[in-house]
């Protein structure tokens, strides 16, 4: 088999859908919905600036004036993630957002769970999209 034929065969095989059960698809949808709802709650709390948010900003050493911008950024990331056509981009943006949250927690020596929570949340976001997005499953094949 020459390289041109081999390339066509590999491309053809890569374009085949990866079968997924209805349960796995719904699990992905539920995880993604939980991710979006959590981001909406977080973003609106940044916009409303209740006492716990103000206290967290003081503890983390950030001016409360940044809360509004962080809230808008969270809303934009959540919206991009929620739209099926842009969901992978949204997951990438949320990864950056959550990485910043993890770094902020590490910087002030927060307790382990508070430091790991953004990472756990990122795993939920990526798990949801992985389970419901055929393109991502083809890109990152899991072996049995």
Image: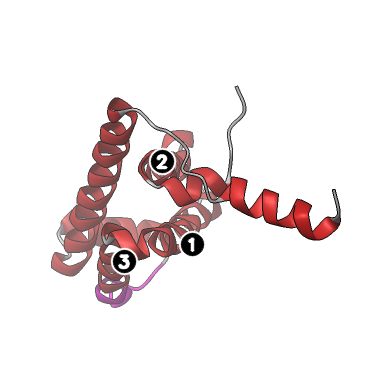
Q: Are marks 2 and 3 in contact (CB under 8 Å)?
A: no
Residue at the (58%, 44%) spot, across then down: 140
Q: Quadrant of residue 120?
A: top left
| Above or below, comparing residue 30 to residue 109 in the picture | above
Read off the residue under disc 2: 117
Q: Nearer the viewer, residue 44 or 11?
A: 11
Residue visible at 23% across and 62% down in the picture: 43
> Residue 72's spot in the image, x, y percent?
26, 73
Tag 3 and tag 1, C-beta contact below 8 Å? no
Extreme residue toward the top, this view: 144
Q: In the image, which residues are magenta?
A: 62-69
Q: Position of residue 55 (x, y in %)?
A: 27, 57
Q: Name the spot of residue 78 as percent of width and height, x first.
A: 28, 61
Identify which residue, 4 or 90, lies in the foreground: 4
Which class describes the residues within 10 Å of circle 2: few (<14), some (14-19), or many (20+)?
some
| 1 and 2 marks in contact (CB < 8 Å) | no
SS at badge 2: helix
The residue where tag 1 is placed is 96
Left-right relation of 139 to 17: right
């Amino acid at each position: 088999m020459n390289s041109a034929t081999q390339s066509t065969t590999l491309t053809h095989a890569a374009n085949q859908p990866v079968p997924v059960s209805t349960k796995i698809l719904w699990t992905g949808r539920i995880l993604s919905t939980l991710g979006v709802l959590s981001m909406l709650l977080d973003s609106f709390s940044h916009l409303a600036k209740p006492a716990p948010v103000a206290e967290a900003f003081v503890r983390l050493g950030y001016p409360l004036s940044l809360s509004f911008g962080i809230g808008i950024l969270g809303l934009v990331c959540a919206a991009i993630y929620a739209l099926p056509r842009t969901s992978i981009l949204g997951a990438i943006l949320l990864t950056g957002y959550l990485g910043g949250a993890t770094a902020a927690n590490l910087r002030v020596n927060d307790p382990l769970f508070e430091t790991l929570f953004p990472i756990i949340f990122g795993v939920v976001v990526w798990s949801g999209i992985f389970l419901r997005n055929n393109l991502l499953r083809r890109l990152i094949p899991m072996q049995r």
